[in-house]
Image (cartoon, helix red, strand yellow):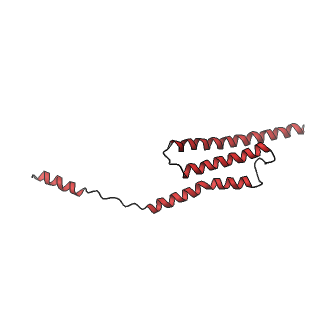
Amino acid sequence: MSDNENNYNEKEEEKVFEPEIVNNDDTDKNKSLNSILSWIPFILALIYTISPVDFIPDVIPVAGWGEDALFLIASALHGIQNTVLDKNTSIYKIVKYIKWAAFIFTIIFILILVLLIVLVFKVSSN
C-alpha cells in the first residue's frame, strides 16, 4: 500500500459517526407548555359563553348565541390546530384558514350588529 492509501484509510477511520446526544426534556416541556397555552383561548371562550357579560346580549336570540358559538368555534379550532395536528399536514393548513375565517366572520358579525343597533337608536330618537 502506498502512503496516500494509508492516509486515506486513516482519515476514513477518524470519521466514525458518533450520535449527538439530545436532551428531550426541554422539547417535552416546550410541547406540554405549548399545548396548555393553546387551549387557554378555548377556556376563556367557555367562560365568556357562560358569563352574563356579552358583546351582544343573549336576549337577542340569533345574534347573541351566534356570537358565542363563533367565539367557541374559533378558539376550539385554535386549540386543535396547535396541539392535535401535525404542522406539515394539509389538514393543519385547512383548520388554520377555517379558524381565521371564523374569527373574521365573528368580528364582522359583531360590527354589523353594533351598526344596526346604532341605526335603530338614531332613527328612534328622531
Q: Position of residue 11 (x, y in %)?
A: 20, 55
Q: In this view, does 41 lie above or below 98?
A: below
Count of numbered marks: 0
Q: Is residue 112 above or below residue 40?
A: above
Q: In this view, does 20 lie above or below 90?
A: below
* Residue farthest left in this picture: 1
What residue sits 47% from the left and 59% below the top? 27
What residue sits 28% from the left and 56% below the top? 17
Give 5 or 58, whichever is nearer the viewer: 58
What residue sits 51% from the left and 41% below the top? 90
User: Which quadrant: the C terminus?
Assistant: top right
Q: Position of residue 113 (x, y in %)?
A: 77, 41
Q: Position of residue 29 (x, y in %)?
A: 50, 61
* Residue farthest right in this picture: 126
Tell me where residue 66 sits by quadrant. top right
Is residue 21 rendered to the left or right of residue 103?
left
Is residue 11 rendered to the left or right of residue 72?
left
What residue sits 48% from the left and 60% below the top? 28
